[in-house]
Amino acid sequence: PQVDKVQFDKIMGYIDSGREQGANCVTGGTRKGDQGFYVEPTVFTDVNDDMKIAQEEIFGPVMSILKFSDIADVVKRANTTTFGLAAAVWTKDVSKAHQVAASMRAGTVWINCYDVFDAAAPFGGFKMSGIGRECGEAGLHNYTELKTVTMSLG
């Protein structure tokens, strides 16, 4: 379920926007059940780069599928967005996976997996995503302030 009605309504608004802008909802797109704030997992195809569902972070069970011509095209388009919290690369070609991961302007890039976390690894986004880093040593720096004190002893 979504955390509250506000988030539920926000996600449903994204789904409505996707339909209104011409994306094809191939599954889901509705409320699940009569109680709680459940949204059916939703998948859109025929999504263009300029559509709201391709440009904004939804934070809900909505996936947009966009076609691309080659690696340079997909990296350029992914890096053009305002956000950069996380990305995933799915391929059997390990070399290409590392090439894409290195080129992506995202705080986390998963390869052949998604939403996998390690408490020792920093997590946070690039650009307009996130609020710094969480987890790991980098996360501790968000809660500390460095100070230098110099004293003459003579």
Image (cartoon, rainbow, N blue to C red):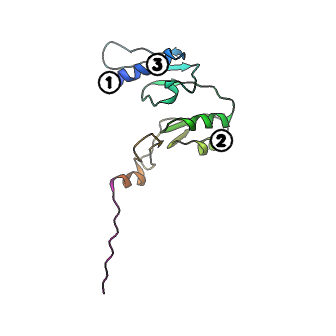
Query: Mark 3 vs mark 1: which is more N-terminal?
Result: 1
Tell me, yes or no, whether the highlighted magenta stretch contains residue 151: yes
Residue 65 falls in which quadrant of the image?
top right
Q: Nearer the viewer, residue 132 or 98?
A: 132
Label 2 Cα crowd, 10 Å radius (few <14 / some 14-19 / many 20+)? few
Q: Quadrant of the C terminus?
A: bottom left
Q: Residue at x 43, y 50 (%)?
A: 120
Task: Residue under label 2, please give it.
Answer: 94
Three-letter amino acid code at the position of disc 3 = Ser
Q: Residue at x 56, y 36 (%)?
A: 80
Mark linked to residue 6: 1
Tell me, yes or no, whether the highlighted magenta stretch contains residue 37: no
Q: Secondary structure at mark 1?
A: helix
Task: Determine contact: label 3, label 2, CB under 8 Å.
Answer: no
x and y percent of residue 146 in the render?
35, 62
Tell me if 102 is positioned left or right of 116 in this view.
Answer: right
Establish if 119 lies above or below 36. Answer: below
Q: Secondary structure at mark 2?
A: helix
Task: Residue under label 3, please give it.
Answer: 17
Mark 2 and mark 1: Cα distance apart in space? 41 Å
Query: Mark 2 vs mark 1: which is more N-terminal?
Result: 1
x and y percent of residue 49 in the render?
57, 27
Kindly report which numbered mark, 3 or 2, lies closer to the viewer in this rendering. 3
Mark 3 and mark 2: Cα distance apart in space? 36 Å
Label 3 Cα crowd, 10 Å radius (few <14 / some 14-19 / many 20+)? some
Three-letter amino acid code at the position of disc 1 = Val
Query: Mark 3 vs mark 2: which is more N-terminal?
Result: 3
The segment highlighted magenta reads: 143-154
Tell me if 58 is positioned left or right of 45 in this view.
Answer: left
